């Protein structure tokens, strides 16, 4: 049997797993492919869960592919069945149902789980977190019934939920422990803009707060303390990040980064067992051209790593080197990032047509390394081209409002 006709088993039907199915089907490898999904829904898009899906009870899940597509591609779909154990010596994967799948290639695309606090289990009737369709369905019902919503965490997902709740007419409070919003991912200037926009939209954003003393009465969180002051809670949503899903890999003895998180992979996304790859949110990979390791949570990273995985599987490995990019929608704001924010870059503001539309260009020396855009989608597209091709227009030229950024790309 040639390497490429051996069974390819993918664990996880999220963005990375489904994109790999797309790529394998296009390469004629669908009939060798199994997709194992612990969720019962057909694979769906995750980003709308904190946006359009939360807003309206009539909004349906946006599926990646219908059941017929998987059948036509020859891909065997194992829905509602979790992978529970890898036998690396026998090269088999055991599912919760008891099925045992032999593999030539095993791809872990297990994503991440919403981080929660032990003191605040989501089994409490008015405490929620958001990662899956089931979470979103529950949160949508809870939001409909609530008047006041407390969001713990001022990261992307917390702020998207807060903005959606505010648009639904709820009184929203965001509690963030850090001195600013989006501390891990955007520049201070962008964080200030986002803060001002949310406050102008009526959201009570409190920064640098210490949240403690959770008061649980029956099956509900009744109150908590903010900086020592007790406050009642009607509905609390946790937006405190995500933890990569590595339990399967760890149990199989694969190298995992227990501090930064994720299954440790090489540039072609192979784990410490070369027959097992990891892609998407669960992968801890080397940044191309640097000594840094990264783990990214974005649709771009999931999709592009699936393409690199295909190259590895088909015997033409290439280093993963895609440009990172990301978007977030928060009320009327569309934030888009291209490249990764440098720790010590210099920022230049490129004005847009209105005060609410601009881009921030980050330079290290003379090199453009990252562009953050607010309601400036054309800048974002142009920035991606510039960053992908390594072009760096001088800041004064790039920030001339009379010259569109795309003319430099
Ligand atoms: P996932 O999409 O999480 O898929 C992993 C799948 O594996 C899940 O279905 C999980 O149930 C399954 N799984 C795990 N373990 C097992 C097992 N043992 N057996 C079987 N199945 C298993 N990114 C953006 O770029 N822009 C956005 O606007 C944006 N918005 C987001 C909004 C929300 C609410 C969330 C939760 C995420 C958002 N993201 C956004 C992030 C983006 O969705 C993720 O980066 C992307 O889904 C990662 O894809 P993945 O396939 O690696 O993981």
Image (cartoon, rainbow, N blue to C red):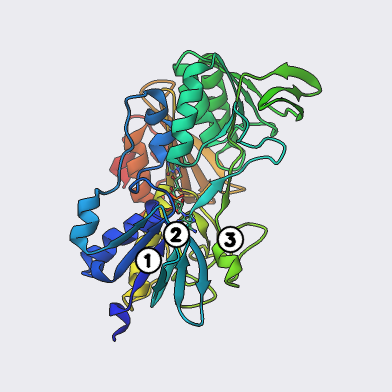
> Measured from the top left, where is residue 101 in percent x and y?
40, 71
Helix, strand or loop at mark 3: helix
The disc, 1 or 3, on the residue closer to the chain's N-terminal end is 3
The residue that label 3 is drawn on is: 247
Residue at x 26%, y 49% (from the top left corner):
65
The disc, 2 or 3, on the residue closer to the chain's N-terminal end is 2
- The residue nearer to you, when weighing 143 against 317, is 143
Mark 3: C-beta under 8 Å from nearest atom of ligand 1: yes
> Measured from the top left, where is residue 25 in percent x and y?
24, 64
Task: Decide: few, some or many residues near mark 2? Use Cα within 10 Å; few <14, some 14-19, many ≥20.
Answer: many
Mark 2: C-beta under 8 Å from nearest atom of ligand 1: yes
**Most extreme residue toward the left, as rendered?**
72
Mark 1: C-beta under 8 Å from nearest atom of ligand 1: no
Residue at x 54%, y 51% (from the top left corner):
365
The residue that label 1 is drawn on is: 308
> Measured from the top left, where is residue 273 in percent x and y?
51, 77
The residue that label 2 is drawn on is: 109
Tell me if 405 is positioned left or right of 290 in this view.
left
Determine the image quadrant of residue 355. top left
Q: CA distance from mark 1 to mark 3?
A: 23 Å
- Image depth: mark 1 or mark 2 in front: 2
Tell me if 285 is positioned left or right of 35 in this view.
right
Tell me if 95 is positioned left or right of 249 in this view.
left
Residue at x 32%, y 33% (from the top left corner):
60
Residue at x 51%, y 49% (from the top left corner):
340
Task: Decide: few, some or many residues near mark 1? Use Cα within 10 Å; few <14, some 14-19, many ≥20.
Answer: many
- The residue nearer to you, when weighing 102 against 162, is 102
Q: CA distance from mark 1 to mark 2?
A: 13 Å
The disc, 1 or 2, on the residue closer to the chain's N-terminal end is 2
């Amino acid at each position: 049997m040639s390497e490429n006709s051996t069974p390819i088993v993918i664990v996880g039907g999220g963005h990375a797993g489904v994109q790999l199915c797309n790529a394998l089907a296009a390469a004629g490898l669908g009939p060798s492919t199994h997709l194992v999904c612990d969720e019962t829904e057909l694979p769906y898009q995750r980003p709308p869960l904190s946006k359009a899906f939360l807003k309206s009870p009539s909004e349906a899940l946006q599926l990646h592919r219908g059941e017929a597509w998987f059948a036509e591609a020859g891909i065997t779909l194992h829905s509602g069945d979790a992978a529970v154990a890898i036998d690396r010596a026998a090269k088999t994967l055991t599912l919760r149902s008891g099925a045992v799948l032999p593999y030539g290639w095993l791809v872990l695309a297990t994503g991440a789980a919403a981080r929660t606090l032990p003191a605040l289990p989501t089994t409490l009737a008015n405490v929620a977190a958001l990662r899956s369709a089931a979470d979103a369905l529950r949160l949508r019902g809870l939001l409909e019934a609530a008047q006041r919503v407390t969001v713990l965490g001022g990261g992307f997902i917390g702020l998207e939920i807060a903005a959606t709740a505010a648009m639904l007419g709820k009184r929203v409070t965001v509690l963030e422990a850090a001195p600013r919003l989006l501390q891990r991912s955007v520049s201070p200037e962008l964080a200030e803009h986002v803060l001002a926009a949310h406050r102008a939209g009526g959201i009570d954003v409190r920064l640098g707060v210490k949240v403690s003393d959770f008061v649980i009465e029956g099956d509900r969180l009744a109150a908590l303390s903010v900086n020592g002051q007790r406050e009642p809670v009607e509905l609390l949503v946790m937006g405190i990040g995500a933890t990569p899903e590595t339990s399967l890999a760890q149990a199989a003895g694969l190298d995992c980064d227990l501090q930064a998180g994720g299954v440790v992979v090489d540039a072609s996304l192979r784990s410490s067992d070369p027959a097992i790859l990891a892609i998407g949110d669960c992968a801890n990979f080397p940044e191309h051209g640097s000594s840094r390791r990264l783990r990214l949570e974005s649709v771009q990273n999931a999709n592009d790593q699936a393409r690199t995985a295909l190259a590895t599987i088909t015997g033409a490995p290439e280093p993963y080197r895609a440009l990172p990019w990301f978007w977030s929608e928060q009320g009327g704001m569309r934030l888009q990032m291209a490249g990764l924010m440098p720790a010590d870059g210099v920022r230049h503001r490129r004005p847009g047509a209105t005060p609410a539309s601009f881009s921030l260009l980050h330079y290290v020396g003379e090199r453009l390394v990252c562009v953050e855009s607010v309601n400036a989608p054309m800048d974002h597209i142009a920035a991606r081209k510039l960053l992908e091709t390594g072009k760096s227009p001088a800041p004064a030229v790039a920030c001339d409002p009379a010259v569109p950024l795309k003319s430099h790309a």
